[in-house]
Each structure stands twice: as C-alpha cells, then as structure tokens.
Image (cartoon, rainbow, N blue to C red):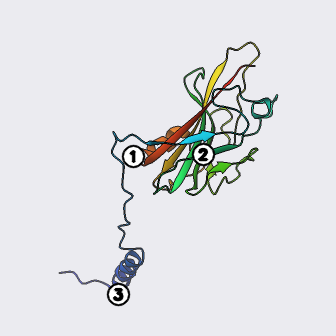
Amino acid sequence: MRSITLPALLFLTLAAMLVAACGGGNPEPVPTIAPDATPVQMTLTSPAFEDGDPLPDEYVCQGQAPGISPPLRWSGAPEGTQSFVLALTDLDGPLGPLQHWLVFDMDGDADSVGPGQETGEKVNGGTQGRNELNRRNEYAGPCLPAGFPEHHYEFHIYALNMKLGVWDRAFLVDIKLVMAGHVLAEGVLRAVYAP
C-alpha cells in the first residue's frame, strides 16, 4: 500500500474541512411543482392603462429612445413565494413572440414596480435581463414603423418558490428553462400598439 505524503494529507484534511463548512456539499433542494399543476392566477394591473387598452405614448419608443417602463402592480401571490419574474412580450413579432423586457429575482414581498426603470437598474432587488430588440438590460418599448398593423403585447408576472440566481445576460428563453417546475402563480396584463 502506498503511503500518503504530508502535503497530500494536508490537502485532503483541508478539503474535508471546506466541505464540512459548506454543509457537506448537499444543499437542501428546492422542491419542484408537478409539471401538470395549474399555477394560481394573480392579478396584474397598471394605473396607466386598462387591460387590453393601447399602450400610452410615453411607454413606446420615441425615435431612438426606447420609451419608459410603465408602473405595474400585482396581487395574489401565494405563500411560499421567494421571487418574481416580470416580462413584456410582443406576441406579433416578425419571427414569433419577441421579448421587450425582463426582470428576474425580484424580492418575494414585492407588489409593484414604478415607472421609468433605468438601464441595468435593480428593480425590487431583481436583475434586468436582456431584451431581444437591442440586447441590452433595459425596457425596450414597442417600436413599429408607420403603417404597420396593430401588435398585441403581454406583461407577465410569475411568482416562484426560489430565486433563480442566473447572470444578467439571460434572455426570457433562458429564464423559462430555469424556472420550470418552480412557478407558483402567474398573471397577465395585455396591451396593444399601432404606430
């Protein structure tokens, strides 16, 4: 049998101490929700417009400026909510749904966002992910050339039983993969826009 050298023994001892200090390397897993479970319905509203109304001008692009994000409020998050994800999607994008805004890992006790969130700014402790228009970490308001037909938009709020902890370069498609099985509740607010 080969003898263990002193440096190797010190390394193994140190490694064992680090594993023990970190809880044995087996953190408590976050329980998943059954794939066929129906999320609880939340209410998502805005004081700036009603469900299904045209989006007011200040929340759409103005030339090269992306517009400002609207104020939003939500209620009905169930017990056990640890974080929220907020997204804005154009349902009539040229190649399918197009993501205009994404915020994830908002605090689990949040119930609103104010208007005009700045590029890269933390929102209720959450991170703004990248949009699919200019690939920046910001709100990108609806922006269509003159003469285009009306587009339909949806703001979505998701209540999760965990924080996602992903990096800020994530898009909504990435976030949906990570949050699968962890959505407790969701709500939607619809709007339309035509130039």
Q: CA distance from mark 1 to mark 3?
A: 47 Å
Q: CA distance from mark 2 to mark 1?
A: 21 Å
Query: Mark 1, mark 3: which one is toward the viewer?
Result: 1
Instruction: Indicate whether 117 appears above or below 94.
Output: below
Residues under numbered marks 3 and 2 in contact, where contact means CB atoms less than 8 Å apart: no
Q: Does any portion of residue 91 appear in the rendered image?
A: yes
Q: Secondary structure at mark 1?
A: loop
Residue pictured at 74% horizontal, 12% vertical? 147
Would you name the residue on which mark 1 appears?
181
- Decide which of tag 1 and tag 3 comes sooner along the chain: 3
Would you name the residue on which mark 2 appears?
74
Type of the residue with mark 3: Leu
Residue 24 position in % (x across, y down): 35, 73
- Decide which of tag 3 and tag 2 comes sooner along the chain: 3
Would you name the residue on which mark 3 appears?
6
Q: Quadrant of residue 52?
A: top right
Type of the residue with mark 2: Trp
Residue 116 position in % (x across, y down): 76, 44
- Decide which of tag 2 and tag 1 comes sooner along the chain: 2
Instruction: Indicate whether 175 appears above or below 21.
Output: above
Q: CA distance from mark 3 to mark 2?
A: 60 Å
